[in-house]
Image (cartoon, rainbow, N blue to C red):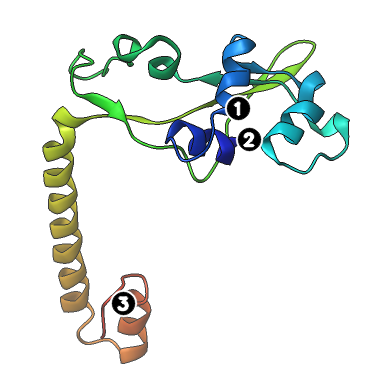
């Protein structure tokens, strides 16, 4: 479902899943799992494996005026969608008598892009200085010990 939603939001495929979400108040109910899988071309398995899914895409649901506000600059003027997570497909919400999943995409505030680049550059510089200091401190040690330290850092040779 996550892959299909990503594809539809990007405009790469027909909005079958998005249309179903619109019809059902942005929910995919587990009771409709067979129909959803069939219309999306996904293999359906055992019905008990499926859980309700709540989609949270405010800018798609209500338009650009519903784009989330940046907690740092307190504005939504430079906030843009920043793709979907690749390492998880949603958050599990656990209730007293049931649970469901919430899926969304990430958002980024472009006003902090330059700040982030400077911070990353400074961190990389600090790491290089620390690495050089480790080499200097270990200069009297064996090549194996220096190699063990270098193995922790890419592009380094003792």
Occupied quadrant, residue 27: top right
Q: Is residue 13 left or right of residue 117?
A: right
The reply to whether the C-beta atoms of the residues labelled 2 and 1 are less than 8 Å apart is yes
Number of labels in the image equals 3
Q: Nearer the viewer, residue 61 or 73?
A: 61
- Left or right, 17 with respect to 118, comes to right
Q: Quadrant of the N terminus?
A: top right
Labels 3, 2: front one: 2
Left/right of residue 34 with respect to residue 134 in the rendered view: right
Question: Which residue appears at 14% of the width and 28% of the height?
Answer: 111
Secondary structure under the numbered disc 2 in the rendered image: loop
Comes first in the chain, label 3 or label 1: 1
Q: Where does the image place residue 78, in percent across and percent down from the top left?
A: 19, 23
Q: Which mark is residue 150?
A: 3
* Vertical position of residue 75 compared to residue 146: above or below: above
Q: What kind of element bears circle 3? A: helix
Q: Residue at x 13, y 64 (%)?
A: 129
Q: Which residue is mark 1?
A: 17
The residues bearing labels 3 and 1 have C-alpha atoms spaced at a distance of: 49 Å
Residue 52 picture location, percent across and down: 71, 21
* Nearer mark to the viewer, of 3 and 1: 1
Q: Position of residue 17 (x, y in %)?
A: 60, 27
Q: Earlier along the polypeptide chain: callout 2 or callout 1? A: 2
10 Å neighbourhood of mark 3: few (<14), some, or many (≥20)?
Answer: some
Extreme residue in the bottom direction = 143
Q: Which residue is mark 2?
A: 1
Where residue 99 appears, as percent x and y from the top left, is 72, 19
Distance (Cα) linking label 2 and label 1 = 8 Å
Marks 3/2: CA–CA distance: 42 Å
Q: Earlier in the sequence, mark 3 or mark 2?
A: 2
């Amino acid at each position: 479902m996550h892959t299909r939603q990503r594809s539809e939001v990007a405009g790469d495929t027909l909005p079958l899943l998005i249309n179903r979400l619109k019809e059902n108040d942005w929910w995919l109910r587990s009771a409709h799992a067979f129909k959803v899988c069939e219309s999306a071309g996904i293999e359906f398995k055992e019905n008990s494996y499926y859980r309700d899914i709540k989609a949270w895409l405010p800018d798609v649901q209500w338009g650009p005026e519903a784009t989330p506000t940046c907690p740092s600059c307190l504005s939504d003027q430079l906030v843009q969608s920043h793709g979907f997570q690749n390492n998880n497909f949603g958050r599990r919400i656990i209730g007293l008598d049931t649970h469901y999943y919430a899926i969304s995409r990430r958002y980024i505030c472009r006003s902090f892009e330059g700040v982030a680049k400077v911070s990353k550059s400074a961190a990389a510089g600090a790491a290089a200085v620390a690495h050089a200091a480790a080499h200097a401190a270990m200069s009297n040690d064996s090549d194996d010990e220096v190699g063990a330290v270098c193995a922790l850092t890419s592009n380094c040779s003792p």
